[in-house]
Image (cartoon, grey):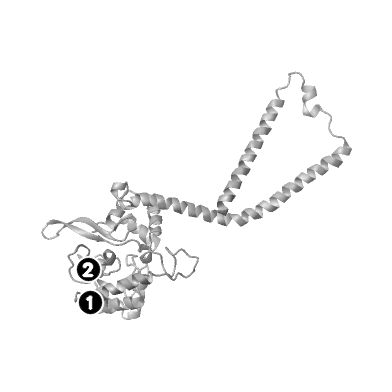
Amino acid sequence: MIAAVTTNIAWIILVIAIGGWIVYGLTNIRRSRAEIGSEITLAANRKPYYDDEILEGKKIERTQLLGLLFLVVVTITLPLYWILEPSREAGAIKMWDHQFDSWGGKLFAATADGGYNCAGCHGGMKGPGGAAAYSMTDPKTGEVKEVSWKAPAINTIYYRYSEEEVRFILNYGRPFSPMSPWGLVGGGPMNEQQIQTVLTYLKGIQIPREDCRLISDDPLTCDGGHLPKATQDEIQAEAERLVAAGTYKTVGEALFNLDLGSGNYSCARCHTKGWSYGDPQVTGGGGFGPNLTGGSAVRQFPQKSDMVAFINGGSEYGKRYGEQGQGSGRMPAFGAMLTESQISAVVDYVRGL
């Protein structure tokens, strides 16, 4: 609000200043059109000027008053500008975020609506998770088959990844999956600004977090927040239902393979080949993510607490983890989505594979 008022005042001052110069110019042009030959009487330097009494009296007082007036204006306006500038900048950022959100939404939209069909795969404009048609070729037989690939929910993508990690995914895609590269650097159709608008749009569809560190923080992207308790309870209830139904033996196994949000909360989506298209092979045997079977998780993380911390925070590009690991940024962080007990249950299950 303050930013908009400041901008309007600036425009008014600009219009007044321009108008003043136009009036000044027209006045001088009009004066210069006097009859030719009258230069002696019209020329400013040929006219009698003020005498000393007036120059050292009213004239100098008027000039000093004018100088004082300008000094008052500068004294007031400069601090006022300094005070209002942060709110103006915040308003500009908010305005451009809104603009980028609008542009990003148009790119995110389904093909029928003129977009690049992100919504078509990920379950709609809010990204709750969906499915994508995908053609696969059997490396042994050469047989081509059509599958329905679970496209995960992306309304929690900033819970799991940083903005730069999401940018990388958009630019380069996910190899061996329907997620194509969309950035020019990865061979896709979008330039840097278009990718940024999609990133901005994704921020606007995140599930609002609970328990942000600061009350003033945006619940869509705040630090320290977590999934709403109702959603975490829904995850727990579904895992317990699957155990009660005999589908899985433990809650940890059920969470590892959880289908909610098209695998949004599961580990099997990356660590079990074929899980995403309904043809799972060895559980935890490796896919887009590394093999977790045969005690490999215990060898990488001799201490359970280290493994819990890694799953909480995910991998960071170039940073060491475990005994022989170096982060790629591909392992998502689950600490803001699952509860401590849920992560502990998953770790217990994986360490037993």
Residue 164: percent from left, percent from top: 39, 60
Q: Which residue corresponds to mark 1?
A: 243
Residue 42: percent from left, percent from top: 77, 24
Q: Nearer the viewer, residue 251 or 329?
A: 251
State the residue at coordinates (66%, 35%).
21
Residue 242: percent from left, percent from top: 23, 74
Q: Is residue 335 visible?
A: no
Q: Could you tell me how far apart the alpha carbons at marks 1 and 2 are, in whole angstroms?
A: 19 Å
Under circle 1, the secondary element is helix
Task: Give the image quarter of residue 37.
Answer: top right
Residues packed near mark 2 inside 10 Å, few (<14), some (14 to 19) or many (20 plus): many
Q: Is residue 177 above or below residue 268?
A: above
**Residue 272 badge:** 2
Q: Is residue 14 above or below residue 265?
A: above
Given the current orientation, which residue lies at the most extreme left position?
Answer: 141
Choose mark 1 or mark 2, whichever is in front: 1
Given the current orientation, which residue lies at the most extreme bottom position?
Answer: 303
- Ranked by sequence position, the earlier of labels 1 and 2 is 1
Residue 16: percent from left, percent from top: 64, 40
Which amino acid, mark 2?
Thr
User: Marks 1 and 2: CB-CB under 8 Å?
Assistant: no
Q: Is residue 244 left or right of residue 24?
A: left
State the residue at coordinates (88%, 37%).
52
Residues packed near mark 1 inside 10 Å, few (<14), some (14 to 19) or many (20 plus): some
Which amino acid, mark 1?
Val
